[in-house]
Image: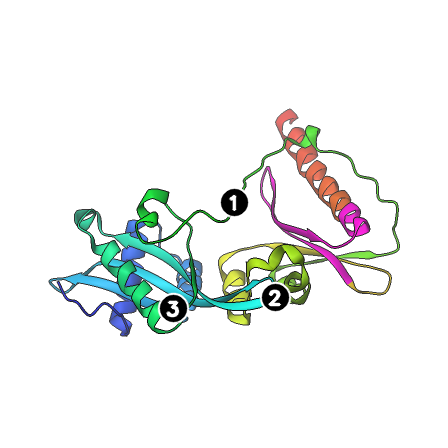
Amino acid sequence: MTTDYRLTSDADREAFYQLYQYAFNNHDTPARRRFFMDRYQHGWIYGRHDHGQLVSGLYSLPLAVNFHGVTYRMNGIGDVMSAPEYAGQGGAGQLLTTALTEMAANHVTLSYLAPFAYGYYRRFGYEHVFDHAHQVMAAPDLPRVKPTDWSGTITRYGNDGLAPINDFYARQPQNQRGGLIRPAWWQHYLTLKHHWSVAIYRNAAANIEGYLIYERQATNFAIQEWVTSTPTAFERLANFITKNVFRIFSRVFAGRLS
């Protein structure tokens, strides 16, 4: 095994991608390769070799977060992986220790990750801080919201709607409790990875007061983010959601009767 864990060559990048495909049971597609490589170029990439073969890997993404008005450097850890035949041999742990050591040397204050096992990452100093809730509601149970103010407008976008909402996102108090400061490259990466839609509510003065990031699926209306700063924006976007949900529900119901 080598002890030089930073990956920098084109061959390393391709090997990392192939290990990522196998470890997470993904399939190579042009779209997947585009978003993966776009993210890869911004990371500190680590890998462990055995007999010239990459057998473990992870990336450390330099980013920043807003904590009550103070900006802290933060590296996000992702794609922690080992080939099945090398799992349990400590490779991922060695790489994570190396990444954390380099963060400390570069005065990176924080590190975030989405754990596959809390107990495992607690060994390296991580702790549960944020909750990720997945809520499901049947269409008939969705409350009907009738707005009281129709003076503003809702405009629908594709992924290009992520750019105009970024300043609004950054001003919201809930995103200033350790929330990610989203750089332009991160927004671009999201547009490559996801086929999202964005609905933006603007008041009568054309100022943004809320937005919705969502995905219309075959039988679901999947909301990724719903942020508002006024009751009117909440009502208008809630009404927008119900109209879309019942359109999907009606289409599905009609299909079952045909």
Camera-nearest label, 2 or 1: 2
* Image quadrant occupied by the C terminus: top right
Mark 3 highlights which residue?
Answer: 43
Q: In this view, does 63 lie to the left or right of 145?
A: left
The three-letter code of the residue at mark 1 reads His
Mark 2 highlights which residue?
Answer: 69
The three-letter code of the residue at mark 3 reads Gly
Nearer-the-camera pick, 51 or 108:
108
Mark toward the start of the polypeptide (1 vs 3): 3
Nearer-the-camera pick, 247 or 79:
79
Question: Badge 2: how crowded within 10 Å, few (<14), some, or many (20+)?
Answer: few
Mark 1 highlights which residue?
Answer: 132
Camera-nearest label, 2 or 3: 2
Q: In this rendering, is residue 111 above or below 183?
A: above
Mark toward the start of the polypeptide (2 vs 3): 3
Q: Distance between the residues labelled 1 and 3?
A: 24 Å
Q: Provide residue 256's location: percent of width, then percent of height.
A: 62, 27
Q: Residue furthest left?
A: 51
Dots 2, 1 in contact, CB < 8 A: no
Q: Is residue 72 left or right of residue 215?
A: left
Q: Is mark 2 on a helix, strand or loop?
A: loop
Question: Badge 1: how crowded within 10 Å, few (<14), some, or many (20+)?
Answer: few
* Image quadrant occupied by the N terminus: bottom left
The three-letter code of the residue at mark 2 reads Gly
Q: How far apart are marks 2 and 3 (CA)?
A: 25 Å
Q: Is mark 3 on a helix, strand or loop?
A: loop
Q: Does the magenta stretch include residue 235?
A: yes
Q: Distance between the residues labelled 2 and 1?
A: 23 Å
